Amino acid sequence: MLCFKEFKGKTLISIWFQNLPLIHYFYSMLKSMTGFGKATKEFENKTVNVEIRSLNSKNLDLSLRLSSTYRDKEHELKSEITKLLERGKVDLSVYVESKIEETPVQINTDLAKSYYNQLKQLATELNEPTTNLMAQVLKMPDVLKSERKEPNEQDWKDIQSVILLAVEGLNNFRSDEGKSIEKDFETRLGIIADSLEKIKEHDAARIQNIRDRIKKNLEEVVGKEKVDNNRFEQELIYYIEKLDINEEKVRLKTHLDYFIKTMKEPAGGRKLNFIGQEIGREVNTIGSKANDAEMQKLVVLMKDELEKIKEQTNNVL
């Protein structure tokens, strides 16, 4: 059962896993999908070792390595791991070393005796030696049988407690990686934002430069005295409207702000990916409309930083 409460500005998630409480404090920050966790604990009759690792994935892809004794617990365990980790390609291995000598197989004594007596009687009737009958008896069907040990409920609770410690370690690893990714995002978004401000500066002079260049070329072709200035201004307005990037600049700034805001939300990896695509659309449109060498250089810089951001968003939870 998951219980969400606000506690001193944090989201307190109290997770009860088979009556075992595990408390996590999640700050609103990025978390990586890549991580590793390990936990070992000694009990009176066993040692439990748990390793868990995760890689990026669109959904939760969980692979379990668990003793066949606890096979009936797999569904329950997968359900709880899904709640705790949400996404990623996750490998969970649980190793239990028993401190008590256990016999892995049982001998069906009654059946073995029956086989032995029959073989001995047959050997006597055929006048054959009876010195190696036990070896033959042990090869007979159903004499040796593997008995599946029923899981002890306390043993399973002990194993769960170690699994939760390993999962907690994995989540801590993911959080640490998330901090590094967040800093990288902030740096690259800052470069894009700075480039956008420089584009705004160039854009003010760009239109006038385009106007002067077109008028000069027109005068050279048809002659200055033959240029109809009124008609020229009308046609120029139509042409410059196609080069106008004011809407793109506003939308790009909005997307950058939204990206930063979403970074503070838990499990926002998919949303960040979509926002990155929207940023790319605006940058591409600015590049196609720029018609200015300096602005094109800034667009190339923004595209380069955005590609690095998009690579990282694929690894964000």
Image: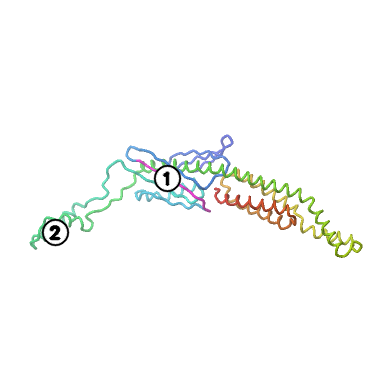
Magenta range is 47-58
Residue at 80 percent across and 51 percent down: it is 205
Query: What amino acid type is highlighted by mark number 1?
Result: Glu
Location of residue 315 with respect to 13 vertically, above or below? below
Q: Nearer the viewer, mark 1 or mark 2?
A: 1
What label sits on residue 51 in the rendered view?
1
**Residue 275 in view in this figure:** no
Residue at the farthest top position: 8
Q: Is residue 57 one of those drawn in magenta?
A: yes
Residue at the farthest front position: 220
> Residue 155 at what x, y percent from top left?
36, 42
Distance Cα–Cα, label 1 vs label 2: 51 Å
Q: Indicate the secondary structure of the residue bearing disc 1.
A: strand
What label sits on residue 119 in the rendered view?
2
Secondary structure character of the magenta stretch overall: strand
Query: What amino acid type is highlighted by mark number 2?
Result: Leu
